Image (spheres, helix red, strand yellow):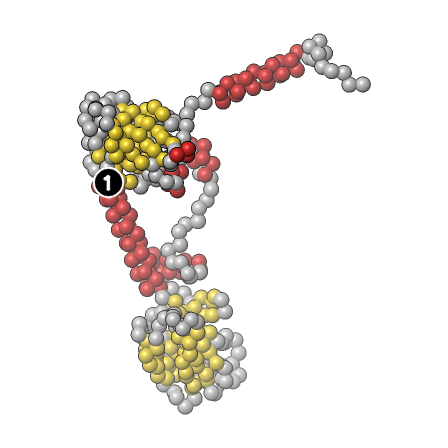
Amino acid sequence: MNTPLSPRATSPLARTVILALLLSGLVVAGAAADEPGPQLTTEPVAVIAEASVPAAVAAEAAPVSVEPARRFPGISIALERAILEYQKHGTPPPVLLEGGAVRVPYSLRPAVVSCPPLTVCDVELEAGETIAGLAVGDTERWAVEESRSGPAVRPTPHVLVKALDYSLATNLVVHTDRRSYQLLLTSPAKDEHGVAPTHRVAYYYPDELLRSAARAEELAARVAAEASERREASFGQLDLSRLNFDYFVEKGRGLPWAPVQVFDDGAHTYIRFPSAIASQELPTLLVSGAGGEASIANWRLLSAAGGPIYKADGVYREARLALGVGRKAEAVVVRNKAFRGGR
């Protein structure tokens, strides 16, 4: 029969464990009850445009391996590696077998196409290229014609070749609106074995891909530099010795969009919001100076990784942020404790 626990029936160790659990529950409950609302931060201005990552999150994310960014989207990893080796060491790009096609790097050296008699071999050029003309050395024993595949707006040109006999060799020249191709056409001997036919040849273009990647990287660097210049111009040359962080949220501290940082440089007031506000409606900014009269401030929005920032002209005794109307109206009041006059 089960009997209820009593102080006498409980061992000293069990009583110690129960007491510890009760005390920990009281501590947790007390911490939850006394938890303060969001506070304004006084972090250095240098991190305004940087995302704040908690140490615990950073520690969890550290071991995760990240795939390096692809320099040449749209081609296989094998082709990308071959092109990077070509760029780094100058080694000739290889001929690869990929997707049922012999992938040939474009160069001034002729590509060799081995085509058995009465078999159509396909030479695929670059998508969007237009064939201007072609010529084959032996017109009697080789048949050559053009073809296209893919969407009509950007078709892929093909050259179809067919040998009419064994043991043949000739050359083929193809001119397009982008480049000229040199090919050597062969057909094996009747009793020849061990020569793999190249039923499908497709070109890839290492130099063009490298130039395109360099242009894209240059453009990305220029865009990043321009964005950095815009950020610096928006913040201006802040004099760190004049920055005032002595602000506090007097009303509306518990609202999710309440500012997390407010400071001024003697000429402008900066109000940073949580990053979550980026997808919400932005509040109206009313300011009060020495006389106490409220007016709408002139401000502009600055983008920052840590959250959007209002940059308002002037320094004020009090700022009031209002969002919504009627019963749904919310307000946050921020006071400048170091205010000594101004607007």
Name the quadrant of the C terminus. Answer: top left
For the view shown, which residue lies furthest in the bottom direction?
140
- Residue 173 left/right relative to 339: right
Q: Residues within 10 Å of mark 1 (few under 14, many from 20)?
A: some
For label 1, the residue is: 234
Q: Is residue 285 above or below residue 17?
A: below
At 19% from the left and 26% from the top, the residue drawn is: 342
Q: Which corner quadrant of the image does residue 309 belong to?
A: top left
Does any portion of residue 306 appear in the rendered image?
Answer: no
Q: Taking the image as drawn, is residue 164 in sight?
A: yes
**Foreground residue, 322 or 249?**
322
Task: Tell me where residue 8 appears, x and y as whole percent.
Answer: 71, 9
Residue at 21 percent of width and 37 percent of height: 236
x then y, percent, for residue 194: 52, 75
Image quadrant where residue 12 sits: top right
Looking at the rendered structure, the kind of residue marked 1 is: Ser
| Nearest the eye: 281 or 38 | 281
When the figure is inspected, residue 311 is found, relative to residue 247, above or below; the finding is below
For residue 86, which quarter of the picture? bottom left
- Residue in front for this viewpoint, 63 or 259: 259
Nearest the viewer among 22 and 188 is 22
